[in-house]
Amino acid sequence: MDRPAYQTEQDVRTRDTVAVGSFLEVDPDGTVNVYSGKVELGTGIATAFAQIVADELGVPFDRIRMVMGDTALTPDQGTTAGSKTVQIAGRLLRRAAAEARRELLDRAADWLEVAPEDLTVMDGVVRPVDGSAAAIPIGDLAGEPFSRKIPDNDEVRGAHHVGLVGQSVPRVDLFAKVTGGEAYVHDIQLDGMLHGRVIRPYVRTMAGAGRIAHVDDRQAKVMPGVVAIVRNGDFLGVVAEREEESIRAAESVQVTWEEGDRLPSREGLHELMRAQPENDTEPLHKGDVDAAMGSAARTMTATYRFPMQAHASMGPSCAVADVRGGSATIYTSTQGVYGLRQALAPLLGLDEDRTRLIFREGAGCYGHNGADDVTADAALLSQAVGRPVRVQWMRRDEFAWEPKGPAMLVDMGAGLDDGGAVTAWDHTVWTPTHTTRPGGQPGNLLAGQQVDPPMLPAVLRNIGGDRNAPTTYTFPSERVTMHWLNDAPLRPSAFRSLGGLHNTTANEMFLDEVATATGVDPVEMRLRYLGDPRAREVVNAAAQRARWGSPLPAIEGLKSGRGFAYARYEAEYTYVAMVAEVAVDPDRGGARVTRVVVAHDCGLIVNPDGVRNQIEGNVIQGISRSLKEEVTWDNHEVTSLTWETYPILTFPEVPEIEIVLIDRPDAPSYGAGEPAICPVTAAIGNAIFATTGVRLRDVPFTPERLLAAMSSGD
Amino acid sequence: MAPPAPPLRININEQIHEVAASPDTPLLHVLRNDLNLNAAKYGCGLGRCGTCTVHLDGEAVHACEVPVGDVGHREITTLEGLGRVGELHPLQRAFLDEQAAQCGYCIPGIIMTAAALLERNPRPSDVELRAALEGKLCRCGSHTRILRAVHRVIDSDQA
């Protein structure tokens, strides 16, 4: 790997988001450098982007070199999140590459004294369309950076298209990952690098950090290899020559924390949420729900409760920082180098333009995990000792300190007419925000809240809790009411799909309840209220592939059944329909998912195997979140600090997954990183009902809950 | 302070290395930080996730739980020693063929676990394979691909 100098090299290239040259550069040897503000989070976007550029520019795939997330080199494209990378940035890159191709053709036309229309680019070489001999490798045309602006309009793929988009091109990052190559921020070693660990209590509220009452670091100070015990206000860390020395030293520091506010009881959390101060919004009100409810022949209600959940990345967060002499070079697996830099520079007292953040992959993050916070930890420790410092959180640190996917509460109401048709759909949510990213706010970093003087916590922006609360069903009246809570027991932030999983669960499980109450088949129920042909197609495709309505093979001693769910991501983008098959042990209550069928339409598919990989991941992570996962805490701190106390789905529990991909070559690409998780819990919950007659409305659907519900005859 | 301990001599990937680490240092840190062998990863430090799996005399072990001073003359194999660029192990080839990873952080430990299993039992059933991988966690949900990749090697009789 190339190692940028410790000192920052700002402004070495243009980085605005309208210039072709910000994104693309051709080397004399014909290599095409792609500078992307979006970063590879393990979802395959480096490969997808390379396909798009190779296709549009007319160069071989292996001549594309991706540079991702470097404040000195790449444009600011915000956070890599929300299933928007291929959808938005991929489209922009395609326009940039198309314009770059036109500029290269114009240059070649001047050189050859022909019209640009008479030229084409293939395999990285410009040649006349008529096949005459003259040919110019694009490297020979690369003397000047690209000078043009990215056009606003999309160009339909034309003759220059060489067909890489739409192919399952193998991932560019996997070779290093299966051979032990340097693939992760965790693998970076700088000359003279030390190792650090941070000490803080295993509790975080949004109100503020634990205060240090007393520190006894006498033992740690004399331990082998210890370079410094760093304290800045309530921020406390150790730095040592070797990693194991830093771990031992951190464990030996005795800290008494001031007793903070007691955490609310976990059992009573959802009722507490109902009673908390809130800001109300009404993001959707179609028709008149109150009037429709008033005149309904029948009304139904149900409440769905969701726990706090953890991103639970396999690799605890890590960063490597070199902060000295008034400048900083920091390696981080953040989802947004610019937003984090805006928060870090003031924390370090540095100018932003002397603070360089360089993205390197972390373990999969699935949203806002500890990556930003650990970057601040490493930077502060490096600044304190004046040498490069690597910090990796311990497993329990990650489970305790990472921002959590917040708990949610959803009340559903429906009004039905005499014939059982839905006339009103009322969806009411209690949730804190699903985003507390640093975005220029040092007070949003754990360390920022702890230093002296502490940085002010950012003003909350209520984001993400309403995702997928609006349906795409043709109900005559529909309302979404949001009760945004100002507080949460543990710091909440973005976790794959934000509220999309929760709200889809409530909508789709409740629709199933209405279907049962009115004697309508669940698939027919969806089709009755879906007019969009693409929506109907995924619903039908999933039902057909799953042989909906056919008997399931018997499994000895177990009862089995199928459940259906559908969602369109954010009611605007990717369409997903899903059938889950479950097997339930009637004596012990455990529900096991045995097969999942997914039909998925994300428009033009850039890389079919990449999309399948994302769908499979969404399904498996979704099953895990549906059946097993819940962050736990006592009065004082997080207690789910290990894989035993925060179990996730394991190999023996993973079902068969069948995927129907619907490709739309003429439609824009939508994201695939999150949509397919949305219907998972509902499909499972509905399958459990079909199998047992029990409606579980509290996630996760644990064996204990299912057994209790079955024995109470609920 | 006590005089520095003499360097430990350990056999890794068929090479003897001298390591100046305290004997109670977890082998994982020695591999990564002293020998620049990045395949084994820190995941939990408690032997509960499998990301640090290596072979000790052919048996899959968690490098986070093995003190380097306990290794003695036993042979340690990491993913870097299982296959090399240009001569990949059949499992590495199969993981690439099946594109069996997303973030990939868990993959080296899973390949090492599968390699040890296939050494012992070249034709495990799907149930046996899943059982052998039970303690190896993957958060991205690449499981079905991982299983396909290992089955590809089993079915090709390269195990």
Image (cartoon, helix red, strand yellow):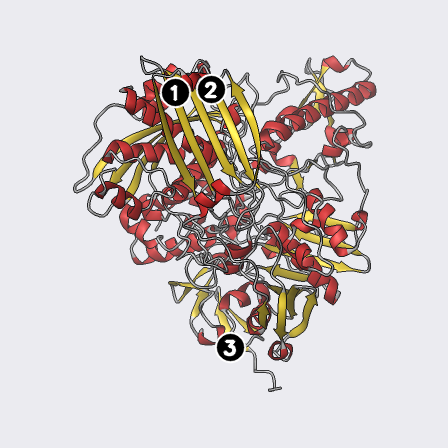
Q: Position of residue A620 (x, y in %)?
A: 40, 40
**Structural crowding at the residue carrying mark 2, measured as other residues with C-alpha within 10 Å and reported as few (<14), some (14–19) or many (≥20):** many
- For label 1, the residue is A415
User: Residue placed at 74% from the left, 24% from the top?
Assistant: A150
Q: Position of residue A110 (x, y in %)?
A: 83, 19
Whether residues under marks 1 and 2 lie with C-beta atoms below 8 angstroms apart, the answer is yes
In the image, residue B87 lies at what x, y percent?
A: 48, 51
Residue identifier under label 2:
A289
Q: From mark 3 to mark 1, how far is it between C-alphas?
A: 70 Å
Numbered circle sitting on residue B23: 3
Say which of marks 3 and 1 sits in front: 1
Q: Secondary structure at mark 2?
A: helix
Q: The residue marked by circle 3 belongs to what chain?
A: B
Amino acid type of the residue that numbered disc 3 sits on in the rendered structure = Pro
Furthest residue toward front: A294
The amino acid type, in three-letter code, at marker 1 is Gly
